[in-house]
């Protein structure tokens, strides 16, 4: 299969607590898309309402380490004592089928994906303000004060990598953010570097 | 006024007869946009239904040459014996106001704009097939057979520059093409290189 027939690899990332998961869910509620969500693997505890194989694959630390050793992750990262990773085989399978694969991952993992898959589309979600981000982290209520403080400190460091992303999307309103991401996906398909080979019979193949 | 507060300069171009004008009109029929059409100046004859100052500013060859000499064009080109140009002052005025300015111009002019305004957004419109393009040129019926043949030959040369554009949009259906361009405009506003300065208070200004 030729490279240009593969789907796009879309990376949705951003600081902890910015609402990446909410934006991703709103994105998948859109009609007429060909998006597939790449379910991450994690060693963290299942939260109320989460479903195995839908929100995450929940595995033990031993199982996770075994998969790292076998090179089975596109990216992986440790975060506040828990490990998160993207299973490589499932991503490739969907891209080969022509689906757009959406990863919703931490910034550390996103930088690994950028290195391994340079033509991925990196989207950095930002909150409307720092205050909004702190409020979100506190409201979640599933973490201790210590964990919240660690997340705030991490978020402040994570903002610094925004410049390495292709796009910055503000999560002022979840539907607005999802609409912007849909526009980005549509636009990326029309980018000359991705689409020109489709038109070689029309425009002639470049001599360069 | 800071650069990032300016609107985008959107260049819609492509081979002769591809339907640039139709796509541009469909674009302006969309709701909730901040687009301004940059009316070109031309020395060609007014066609039936065209309006001075809306479709083109119609001027004499002498008047056109005077404006070239005074550096009053962002771009200008001669095409099948007629001159076409984009008045620079009006474009800058609209961009400064924060409007997105849409130019619908020939490929020769588009390459001049790319040189003068490197951060413009260059969109190349392609027909669904060469046959569709030839049919369009013949149906227009306002030109002699000689002019049609000259346009076909020019179109074939013009296809070669597609690779210098940012995006390629196929005019398979006018509304689809307009939708794709709206998505491109929305996505371009979110591109990190254009938008990061808006978030400096959030992410901190880069040291690099």
Image (cartoon, coloured by chain):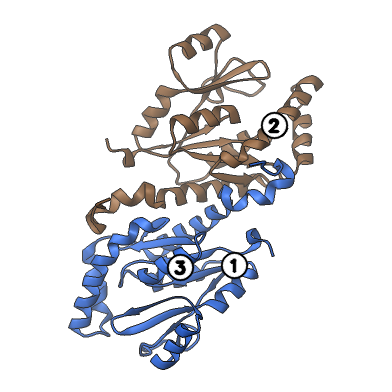
Chain colours: A blue, B brown
Badge 1: how crowded within 10 Å, few (<14), some, or many (20+)? Answer: few
Q: Residue furthest front?
A: A69
What chain does badge 2 belong to? B
In the picture of the structure, the residue carrying the numbered disc 1 is: A34
Badge 2: how crowded within 10 Å, few (<14), some, or many (20+)? Answer: few
Whether the residues at callouts 3 and 1 have beta carbons within 8 Å, the answer is no
- Nearer the observer: mark 1 or 2; the answer is 2
Q: Which of the 4 quarters of the picture holds residue B18? A: top right
Could you tell me if residue B157 is visible in this image?
yes
Q: Residue at x 53, y 44 (%)?
A: B166
What chain does badge 1 belong to? A
In the picture of the structure, the residue carrying the numbered disc 2 is: B157
**Residue A13 image position (x, y, % from top left):** 39, 67
**Residue A92 image position (x, y, % from top left):** 58, 73
A190 on left or right of B153: left
Q: Residue at x 21, y 85 (%)?
A: A144
Q: How far separated are the C-alphas under marks 1 and 2?
A: 36 Å
Whether residue A7 is situated above or below residue A55 in the rendered picture: above
Element on which disc 3 rests: helix
Q: How far separated are the C-alphas under marks 3 and 2?
A: 39 Å
Badge 3: how crowded within 10 Å, few (<14), some, or many (20+)? Answer: many
Looking at the rendered image, the quarter that the C terminus of chain A falls into is top right
Element on which disc 1 rests: loop
- Nearer the observer: mark 3 or 1; the answer is 3
Tell me the tag on residue A113. Answer: 3
């Amino acid at each position: 299969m030729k490279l240009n027939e593969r789907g796009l690899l879309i990376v949705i990332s951003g600081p902890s607590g910015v609402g990446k998961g909410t934006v991703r869910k709103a994105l998948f509620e859109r009609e007429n898309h060909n998006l597939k969500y790449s379910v991450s693997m994690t060693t963290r505890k299942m939260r109320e309402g989460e479903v195995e194989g839908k929100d995450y694959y929940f595995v033990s630390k031993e199982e996770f380490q075994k998969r790292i050793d076998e090179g089975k992750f596109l990216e992986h990262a440790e975060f506040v004592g828990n490990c998160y990773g993207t299973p490589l085989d499932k991503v490739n399978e969907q891209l080969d089928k022509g689906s757009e694969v959406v990863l919703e991952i931490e910034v550390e993992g996103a930088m690994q994906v950028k290195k391994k898959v340079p033509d991925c589309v990196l989207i950095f979600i930002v909150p409307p303000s720092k205050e909004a981000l702190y409020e979100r982290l506190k409201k979640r209520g599933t973490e201790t004060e210590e964990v919240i403080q660690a997340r705030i400190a991490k978020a402040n460091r994570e903002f610094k990598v925004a410049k390495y992303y292709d796009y910055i999307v503000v999560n002022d309103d979840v539907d607005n953010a999802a609409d912007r991401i849909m526009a980005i996906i549509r636009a990326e398909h029309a980018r000359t570097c991705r689409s020109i080979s489709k038109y070689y019979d029309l425009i002639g193949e470049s001599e360069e």
